[in-house]
């Protein structure tokens, strides 16, 4: 596999990203080439500090960076030589099979849509995020790419999320739910009710509506929603995880007795922290574009880069884009029956 890594967009600079690349090269013998993309002088200096001299690594220069505070549309027009665009162009031109970036989410989504384009059946690409549950994990689609959606977009998110969950979790028929404020069919909005009706016309393993209560208690494998709701869910989950870890640390160090208890239960506490750490699940995959694009958190450390590389390798090896195209075309034929009416335009 050949990989393009934008090393400039994260909070911790190119050095931390390159540490992650070094871990990935050691762990993944299938990596034949890694293009590290960004400001060349900074990358060369960081490579020396990290001690990364692997011949599979090649520096590709990009003089500009799309910053977190940049407006994505404006930045992509003005910063033609940005690291995120140069990384995506390596995928577009066939030099790389996938791209990873910690940068501006909107910029990555817009850049991938422009530089790579969508798969033929796809109306909207979606951000798929893996989050922990009580005994496993689940997929959230959309995690923030599309704040406003049509019912048919949510149907396609359900199909793509199901394909992704099947590949990542090994579940033959992932349970798919449309996120709502209650399990009853009378709940939700016009969007969710119409989307649920479409999903039910398919052969997906549709549970109907799922609630926030179901997400972290193993109630669903794929949760479908628009990007506005999904991003709120994602950020709320991330902040809750940080708050719980902080509260545990504060309470377990507040007295000698509690410190002793924490020491005795250290193994279990570390395991809980590992399960709640979003970096353990890699990055958020952009489903529906040509090629493979993974967004990792701006504050990601080297282990997140490693897990994202593993995640990317699995996506590419399983040829999930081909599966997504096949499944979308098949499902479109199911829901295009006269009882449903024509498929909405993109």
Image: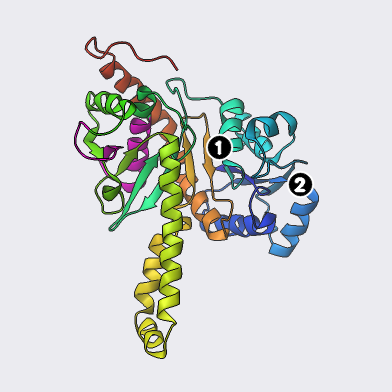
Name the residue rendered at 28%, 33% in the picture. 188
Render colour scheme: rainbow
**Residue 21 inside the magenta-drawn segment:** no
Can you tell which mark lies on residue 45?
Answer: none
Q: Magenta stretch?
A: 157-186
Query: Residue 140 is drawn in which quadrant?
Result: top left
* Residue 247 visible to an observer of this rendering: yes
Vertical placement of 235 versus 275: above or below? Answer: above
Q: Residue furthest bottom?
A: 256
Q: Position of residue 337 (x, y in %)?
A: 24, 12
Can you tell which mark lies on residue 39?
Answer: 2
Say what secondary structure mark 2 lies in: loop
Query: Residue 275 is drawn in which quadrant?
Result: bottom left
Q: Residue furthest right?
A: 41
Q: Position of residue 122 (x, y in %)?
A: 44, 23
The C terminus, quarter of image? top left
Separation (CA) of disc 1 from disc 2: 22 Å
* Residue 173 visible to an observer of this rendering: no
Question: Which mark's residue is nearer the viewer, 1 or 2?
Answer: 2
Q: Residues within 10 Å of mark 1 (few under 14, many from 20)?
A: many
Q: Residues within 10 Å of mark 2 (few under 14, many from 20)?
A: many
Vertical placement of 142 versus 334: above or below? Answer: below
Give whichever of 308, 141 is nearer the camera.
141
Please say if the residues under marks 1 and 2 sit with CB atoms less than 8 Å apart. Answer: no
Q: Is residue 219 left or right of residue 76?
A: left
Give whichever of 175, 254 is nearer the camera.
254
Vertical placement of 90 versus 239: above or below? Answer: above
- Which residue is identified by label 1? 97
Name the residue rendered at 61%, 27% in the picture. 115
Label 1 vs 2, first from the N-terminus: 2
């Amino acid at each position: 596999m050949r990989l393009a890594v934008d090393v400039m967009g994260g909070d911790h600079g190119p050095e931390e990203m390159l540490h992650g690349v070094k871990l990935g090269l050691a762990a993944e013998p299938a990596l034949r080439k890694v293009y590290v993309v960004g400001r060349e002088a900074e990358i060369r200096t960081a490579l020396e500090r990290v001690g990364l001299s692997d011949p599979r690594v090649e520096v590709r220069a990009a003089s500009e960076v799309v910053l977190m505070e940049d407006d994505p549309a404006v930045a992509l027009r003005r910063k033609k030589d940005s690291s995120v665009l140069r990384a995506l162009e390596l995928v577009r031109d066939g030099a790389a099979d996938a791209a990873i970036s910690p940068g501006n989410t909107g910029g990555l989504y817009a850049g991938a849509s422009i530089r790579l384009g969508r798969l033929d059946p796809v109306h909207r690409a979606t951000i798929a995020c893996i989050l922990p549950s009580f005994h496993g994990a689940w997929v959230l689609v959309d995690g923030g790419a599309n704040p406003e959606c049509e019912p048919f977009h949510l149907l396609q998110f359900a199909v793509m999320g199901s394909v992704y969950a099947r590949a990542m979790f090994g579940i033959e028929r992932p349970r798919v739910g449309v996120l709502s404020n209650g399990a009853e069919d009378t709940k939700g909005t016009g969007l969710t009710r119409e989307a649920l009706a479409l999903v039910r016309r398919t052969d997906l393993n549709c549970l109907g509506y799922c609630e926030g209560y179901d997400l972290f208690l193993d109630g669903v494998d794929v949760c479908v929603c628009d990007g506005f709701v999904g991003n709120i869910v994602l950020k709320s989950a991330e902040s809750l995880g940080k708050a719980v870890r902080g509260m545990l640390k504060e309470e377990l160090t507040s007295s000698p007795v509690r410190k002793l208890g924490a020491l005795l239960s250290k193994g279990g506490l570390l395991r809980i922290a590992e399960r709640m750490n979003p970096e353990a699940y890699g990055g958020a995959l952009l489903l529906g574009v040509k090629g493979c694009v993974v967004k990792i958190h701006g504050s990601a450390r080297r282990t997140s880069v490693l897990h994202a590389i593993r995640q990317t390798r699995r996506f590419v090896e399983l040829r999930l884009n081909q599966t997504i195209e096949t499944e979308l075309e098949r499902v479109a034929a199911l829901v295009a029956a006269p009882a449903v009416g024509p498929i909405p335009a993109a």
